[in-house]
Amino acid sequence: MGVFTSEKSKEAFSNIDGAVENEKSTEKTTERPPSYNQADELALAVPQLNLGGTGTTNDPVSADQCVAHLKLLAVLADLRDSISNNDGLFGLFDSEAERFPASSNEANVRIREKRWAVYTARADLESPEYETIVDSPTQVVWSPDNMPPIDILMVWHSHMLNPRDFLEDCIRYGRMSTWRTGFPFEVMNNCIDDRTLEYKTPESSQQTFENKVNLKWDNLLDPPGKELECPRCKKPKTVLWTEGGIGESLQEAFKENTGYADASFEAKCQHCQLLINHERLKVAKFYQDTFDLVQLNQPMPGSIYNLDGIPEGPRNFRIPLSWTNMIFPSRLLKCIDRDMLAFTDPRLDRCKSIDDLRSHMEVRLRDRKVLLAINGRGRSLLKGERIHFRRMMAHYWDNSSPFALDLVGAVIRQGTFVQKMDNIDWLHSPTVMETSERLIKKYKVFMDIMLQNPSKMAVPTLDVDLAWHTHQLQPRHYYNYSTMATYHGHRQFIDHDDKVDENKLSDGFEWTSKMYRRATDGGIYSECTCWYCEATRAPDIYDRLFSIGSSSRARNNADSLHDRPDISSDPERNPHISAHNAVRPTTRATEDPRVGHLQRIRLHQNYEKAARRAEKRGRTRSDAKSSKDGGYEPMYYAPYAWGYPMIVPYYGPYMCDPGISVLAVLGTAALGLVVGVLLLARVVVWGLLPVLVEQVEDAAEAAAEEGVEVEVAEEDVAVAAEVVVDAVVVVVADLPEE
């Protein structure tokens, strides 16, 4: 077995672990900084920033870097707003919304979203071309003269926020100088005007870009079509970016459009008559990757790093199992290269979609002769081999670009975070530096939680996410920082997944809040009093059989939030859960759709308890509206998506951004049968028992730490006794009528 690397990427492997930086300690402050939203709406409160260095072991990022990052996000928010509101851009007119008088706001949202998606697709086209300008064998020397246009900077920003994918692409395409150098904070900051927040570079940089890339600095000035190479005959074919209208249904807006930036893209080659679509382009990508593997020894996607995200190779004449698992996709394709190249050759057109490719490969993986040739014995695949095979295939499902992920989708999902940061508007706060220092401390606790629990999913709040994103924009330093700690003898390169099932995101947020409370001896993770945050922390700090130790202190801290003038129940004004990566499950492999239904039931329960608790203490919540049955309803939420209010009947910040549409969404199944009711009730009851057991274990653990006697509050006993009965009642009452 050989190492599957091209000449471009051999040098990359040797530099990953050698990129260790000298860390410097920083002084710690014990003063509590001012609150997050003490803002001055008149002037931008950005001091002179020192952006010459990187983070240290004690502080992975600096406050100056966080502020510079906020400036970039403000520029991107303005760009997003400008493009989406440009009536008629790309042939998309606001007047189409008039066809839906009962849902005009939603129609306008979909039109603005579509303009932004097309603009982002055009930016993605320019990104790989521009890399040839700044590529260097060692380190990129950034200056105002070689800075890219803002749309390319935006795409690079989103690419870096998927650290494992970014590392893989840099290794496979020999762009390690970009990985070593990281994001040009200092030069970028100097290119943004502090008063107008406009991104400006010298005229010379614009001329260099246009001459070398043969595209306009402003991508709106580029031609309305994209020149595409036919996969079969290699002749050029010009296709429109988007073609068609909004359609007859807002739930499937623009679904039938046939432009390159549309889901149903189709174009017939006038030379060979091949019908070109996204599926055939994905197959052509796979064919090219397999060809490069065979001819250039360039490893296949998904075979660059091991299960812990660490690129590795044979060490001291010893071949670790993790390495053989890691390169399994490349070993497999080298073994069956002739068959796969013939099957996916665009000239033959035998394979028309990724589904066809998967079915064909599954047959080969069941062939004992193939397994014998790969592993020396005809046995089933190891777990690690199966995972790396799935990783390889994941690069092709929704992605025909040369990169490890669909960057257009990544940019659009990041738009949610960009908009939330713009709404909070820390840049106009006179305490922006103190705010940044505070969130860095919180981020360090968050990182410790992730490092100590590698099998769990930790979910950041918005302030933590800002520091986390800022850290990831220094890829080499982020890699060193997240891999320097070991857990049970091995390192892990912590990834930032920007596509997470919304149900798992909510569960992860509740778990992270609990771990943060333990790590900080009673600290509140999400300093927010919106109904969702109240409902999320209630089980951990209120619905307990015993209230001692950090849980008792957390309860006091949570109660004090209602007395602080800087804390609001408006979810737009507080840095609570960061859910820009929430996606709805769309495949058969996802969880039962009843999981989301149960989650809403559970949150509703917890919220009602929080509202009753506040009422008993004489602090009626402003958003606590009584329901017909004597309970409380969570406040209806109307977030602004692309400038229009979108009513969300049952709001949770973990829910998908209403400004990001999904063509295929699995809805909650109607459970009209009695069998369905009983099954659902059983799931709720048995799902709550482990929670009660865990509370007892937590109490025992806290008692041992504190050395105090266990006291049981009367209110806690009543809550524990009622919770199962209430759950079953709510399940039956909340079922769909159909």
Image (cartoon, rainbow, N blue to C red):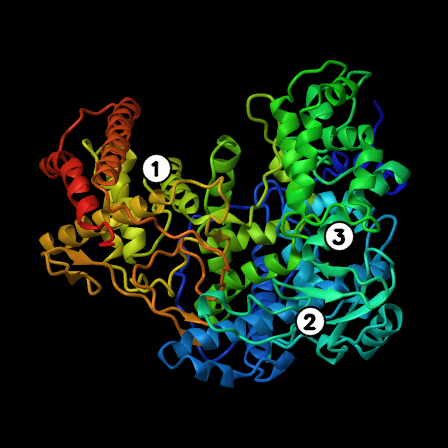
Q: Considering only vertical position in the picture, is 364 above or below 148?
A: above
Element carrying mark 1: loop
Tell whether label 3 touches label 1 (CB within 8 Å). Answer: no
First of labels 2, 1 by sequence position = 2
Gap between marks 1 and 3 measured at Cα: 47 Å
Residue 152 placement, left or right of 455: right
> What residue is pinned by disc 1?
521
Q: Considering only vertical position in the picture, is 309 above or below 73?
A: above
Residue 481 placement, left or right of 210: left
Nearest to viewer (mark 2 / mark 3): 2
Q: Considering only vertical position in the picture, is 200 above or below 170?
A: below
> What residue is pinned by disc 2?
241
Density class for disc 3 (Cα within 10 Å; few <14, some 14-19, many ≥20) is some
Query: Measuring 71% from the left and 23% from the top, which residue is drawn there?
Result: 367
Q: Amino acid at mark 3?
A: Pro
Q: Residue 209: horizontal and vertical position, in percent?
A: 83, 71
Element carrying mark 3: loop
Quarter of the image where the N terminus is located: top right
Tell whether label 3 touches label 2 (CB within 8 Å). Answer: no
Nearest to viewer (mark 2 / mark 1): 2
> What residue is pinned by disc 3?
402
Residue 708 placement, left or right of 110: left
Gap between marks 2 and 1 measured at Cα: 54 Å
Q: Residue 84: horizontal and vertical position, in percent?
A: 56, 76
Q: Amino acid at mark 2?
A: Trp
